[in-house]
Amino acid sequence: MVAFFQRAIVATLLIFAFAASASALDRRVTIINNTGYTMVQFYGSYRDTDSWQEDILGSDVMPAGTSWNVNFNDGTGYCIFDFKAVFSNGEELTDFGINVCEVGRFTYN
């Protein structure tokens, strides 16, 4: 019986350790605009949401050849996000399933 409780305690501790390490993952990504156009809007929404959330650039823009550091840590613990970039020429680029816990840079060409 003691061995059962010891295994249960170890299992519980492992679950908490995994959860803590997942929540501590770095979700900062440098978004790089290597297109010939100014990025006027940028959205990053976790995969399971039905909307694009808010424009991360807000009233700012990202001219061609510049970058923007985005922290995707929204408190949900999610790592998989969908990206949408809107450019001054009207083009929209969407990318799905980006793992922000593993990708440190994301470039638009």
Image: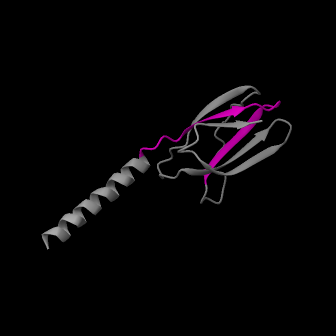
* Magenta stretch holds residue 42: yes
* Magenta stretch holds residue 59: no
Counting from the top left corner in percent of width and height, residue 74 is at 51, 47
In the image, residue 41 sits, relative to residue 80, either above or below, namely: above
- Where residue 14 sits, quadrant-wise, is bottom left
Relative to 100, 15 lies left or right: left
Residue nearest the observer in this picture, 50 or 67:
67
Counting from the top left corner in percent of width and height, residue 82 is at 65, 51
Q: Specify the color scheme.
A: one colour
Counting from the top left corner in percent of width and height, residue 81 is at 61, 50
Look at 54% across and 50% down and name the residue there. 79
- Where residue 69 sits, quadrant-wise, is top right
Total numbered labels: 0
Residue nearest the observer in this picture, 107 or 83:
107
In the image, residue 4 sits, relative to residue 81, either above or below, namely: below
Counting from the top left corner in percent of width and height, residue 3 is at 16, 68
Relative to 29, 91 lies left or right: right
Q: What range is drawn magenta here?
A: 24-46
Look at 72% across and 31% down and name the residue there. 61
Query: What is the chief secondary structure element of the magenta stretch?
Result: strand
Look at 73% across and 42% down and name the residue there. 85
Relative to 76, 4 lies left or right: left
- Residue that lies at the very extreme toward the front in this rendered image: 3
- Residue that lies at the very extreme toward the right in this rendered image: 89
Q: Which corner quadrant holds the N terminus? A: bottom left
